[in-house]
């Protein structure tokens, strides 16, 4: 289904007519409201591009990283291995990552700001779930009023000189650090306490 039609279908599913004109729900009736939430994949769904591939192109290794991204998306390589391999190719420093974010801000998919605003006014929770990096996603979330705690993604931890390779918790000199995937805050659906949870993804993960 084309992205625009998918977003329109999501609006009709979760939002009553004229939801964009309604004020925020009253806190007095908060307990009576049906709890619902929408979880958006970020790359190629919430946003138009694949952020890791965009960072890689900026760093001059776009083709090699894009090939790894395609293999990971197709299930040929476990996600955590593909992410570690892409980071090894990119080797981003904090300075280069900050420069990328300043020069190439994320491009939201058409209709996303309007949809997010309508969902929020209707009292729905909005979550961003990604295999990408918080450094890219947090500015997007902030611009749309999505709480930082509603973002689930990977964190790059640089060493004291803000260079790569990053220092991972529990790592020791000469030892391979844990996978970047293990640093992502796990999404526990039971902890969200929403009766209905809708996921909008650009693809389904391969079966284990």
Image (cartoon, rainbow, N blue to C red):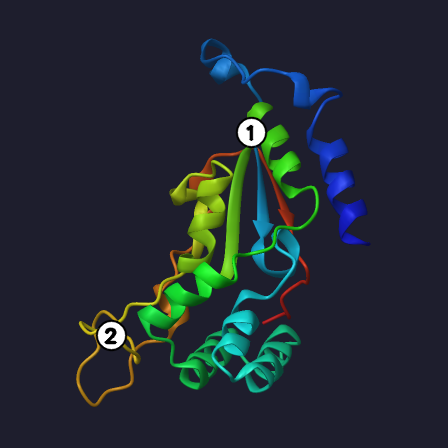
Q: How many marks?
A: 2
Q: Position of residue 158 (x, y in %)?
A: 27, 71
Q: Is residue 114 above or below residue 133?
A: above
Residue 155 appears in the picture as rendered: yes
Q: Is residue 93 left or right of residue 31?
A: left
Any part of residue 132 in sight:
no
Asked if residue 69 is positioned above or below residue 13 in the image, the reply reads: below
Which residue appears farthest toward the bottom when viewing the image?
A: 174
Question: What residue do we see at 44% from left, 81% from top?
Answer: 90
| Residue at 57%, 82% in the rendered image | 68
Circle number at residue 134: none
Within-10-Å neighbours for mark 2: few <14, some 14–19, many 20+: some
Q: Are marks 2 and 1 in contact (CB under 8 Å)?
A: no
x 38%, y 72%: residue: 96
Judged from the image, the secondary structure of the residue bearing numbered disc 2 is loop
Task: Kindly indicate the quadrant of the structure image that contains residue 185.
Answer: bottom left
Sequence order check, earlier mark of 2 and 1: 1
| Viewer-nearest residue: 60 or 39 | 60
**Quadrant of the rendering where the C terminus is positioned:** bottom right
Q: Residue furthest front?
A: 103
17 relative position to 156: left or right: right
- Position of residue 7 measured from the top left corner of the image (x, y, whole percent): 73, 43
On the picture, is 28 further left or further right than 77? left
User: Residue beneath label 1, please?
Assistant: 120
Mark seen at residue 167: 2
123 with respect to 181 (left or right): right
In which quadrant of the rendered image does the N terminus lie? bottom right
């Amino acid at each position: 289904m084309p992205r625009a039609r998918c977003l329109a279908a999501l609006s009709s599913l979760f939002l009553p007519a004229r939801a964009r004109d309604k004020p925020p729900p009253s806190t007095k009736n908060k307990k009576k409201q049906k709890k619902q939430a929408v979880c958006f994949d970020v790359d190629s769904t919430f946003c138009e591009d694949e952020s890791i591939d965009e960072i890689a192109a900026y760093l001059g290794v776009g083709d090699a990283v894009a090939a790894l991204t395609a293999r990971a998306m197709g299930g040929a390589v476990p996600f955590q291995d593909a992410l570690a391999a892409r980071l090894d190719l990119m080797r981003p420093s904090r300075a280069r990552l900050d420069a990328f974010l300043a020069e190439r801000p994320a491009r939201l998919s058409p209709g996303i700001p309007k949809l997010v605003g309508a969902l929020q006014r209707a009292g729905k929770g909005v979550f961003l779930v990604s295999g990408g990096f918080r450094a890219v996603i947090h500015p997007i979330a902030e611009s749309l009023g999505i709480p930082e705690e509603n973002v689930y993604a990977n964190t790059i931890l640089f060493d004291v000189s803000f260079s790569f390779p990053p220092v991972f918790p529990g790592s020791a000199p000469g030892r391979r650090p844990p996978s970047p995937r293990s640093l992502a805050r796990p999404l526990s659906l039971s902890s969200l306490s929403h009766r209905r949870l809708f996921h909008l993804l650009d693809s389904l993960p391969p079966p284990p």
